[in-house]
Amino acid sequence: MRAAYFRGNQVIELVDVPRPTLKPGEVLIKVAANGVCGSDRKIWRGGFELIPGHEVSGTVVETTPGCETPIGARVAVYIPRYCGECLYCRSGRGNLCPHKPGLLGWSTDGGYAEYMALPERNALRLDDRVSLDQGVLLLDTLGTSSHGLRLARAAEAVTVLVIGAGPVGMGAVAYLSALGVPEIYVSEFSDYRLGIAQRYGAIPVNPKVADLEQVIRDSHPYGVDLVVEAVGTQPTIWQSFDLVRPGGSISLLGEYWGKVELERPKSEWMINDIHLIRSFYFTIPEFHENQQMIVDGTLETGPLASHSFPLEEISAAYALFQSGDTVKVLVRP
Ligand SMILES: [Zn+2]
Ligand SMILES: [Zn+2]
């Protein structure tokens, strides 16, 4: 089968490798689509030993004894390699499983290949009315964002600021719009992304041409109910504290591995009853709730999958994503 490997320095090589062989309890899927993710940038530059790709949907083509998933089932890949038995796993919170040895596509071969092997319990069934592309969007784009927003009680918010409208930030905009949140501000440098946010009814702010703090303070002198930080930098984390109102919430969704400095005189965060939510991925029940919202027509996914490329053109997919003028870019093996 064809598979892509990241060789470092943004070089992606396509090679022929054997199809994966299944271990007990696993299923094999024919990969339909794999989403390009901001979290891939590190390995795109630095190289990676395994087949990358962790936002995957596909069709089951082979199973092992004891599996109940039929051949032909369409699935999305839930990446935490959860144990299935602990306190967290029994309630569908595999994202919090303390026993997981890693994530599919990070500690195992991922979806930039024609076929991918995965434990059956990580193959989440798609409703007949949900497409394989939507299956990818239900993962990092909508799953990760809506999990953080649920924890931040976004349904109670009237005014929200989303900082950064990459795939996760735009997923947050889509979910907030589905919840009917009346005022959603989006701060983003790409006018392309701002245009898509506007299709969800959001108020666009490009910090290159407008002073975000001024725009928010003009209408909301105390700040907004909820700030969604979807960039992952220290300045945008500070900005979140500056623009959340006393009693409000901050949902940190941006990937940020550095040291977070919270001390900032201006924000006075310590005396303002700020709820700070740092979340990881999403739960399996939430996946099914979001899927139902797509089926019901409340969650609009149309603008989220902005581009697609065949696997042979994966390098072009990464170059385009790097330009910032995309939402989710899909690669089709
Ligand atoms: Zn991702
Ligand atoms: Zn567990």
Image (cartoon, helix red, strand yellow):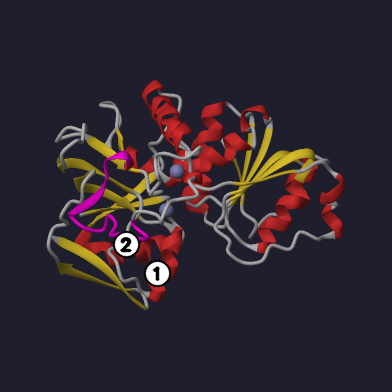
Q: Which residues, given as a range, are shown in magenta?
A: 105-121
Residue 318 placement, left or right of 204: left
Question: Residue at image x 85%, y 57%?
Answer: 266
Residue 205: within the magenta? no
What whole-number distance in Å separates the C-alpha atoms at marks 2 and 1? 9 Å
Quarter that holds the C terminus = bottom left
Question: Residue at image x 48%, y 41%?
Answer: 282
Percent position (x, y) of residue 324?
46, 60
Dot 1 corresponds to which residue? 43
Q: Tags 2 and 1 in contact by the CB under 8 Å rule?
A: yes
User: Between 228 and 7, which is closer to the camera in this rendering?
Assistant: 7
Q: For the residue carrying disc 2, how many other residues have a C-alpha within 10 Å: few (<14), some (14-19), or many (20+)? A: many
Quarter that holds the N terminus = bottom left
Which quadrant of the structure image shows residue 155?
Answer: top right
User: Between 243 and 14, which is closer to the camera in this rendering?
Assistant: 14
Residue 161 placement, left or right of 70: right
- Under mark 1, the amino acid is Ile
Residue 117: within the magenta? yes
Dot 2 corresponds to which residue? 52
Q: Which mark is residue 60?
A: none
User: Between 225 and 277, which is closer to the camera in this rendering?
Assistant: 277
Q: Is residue 74 above or below residue 98?
A: above
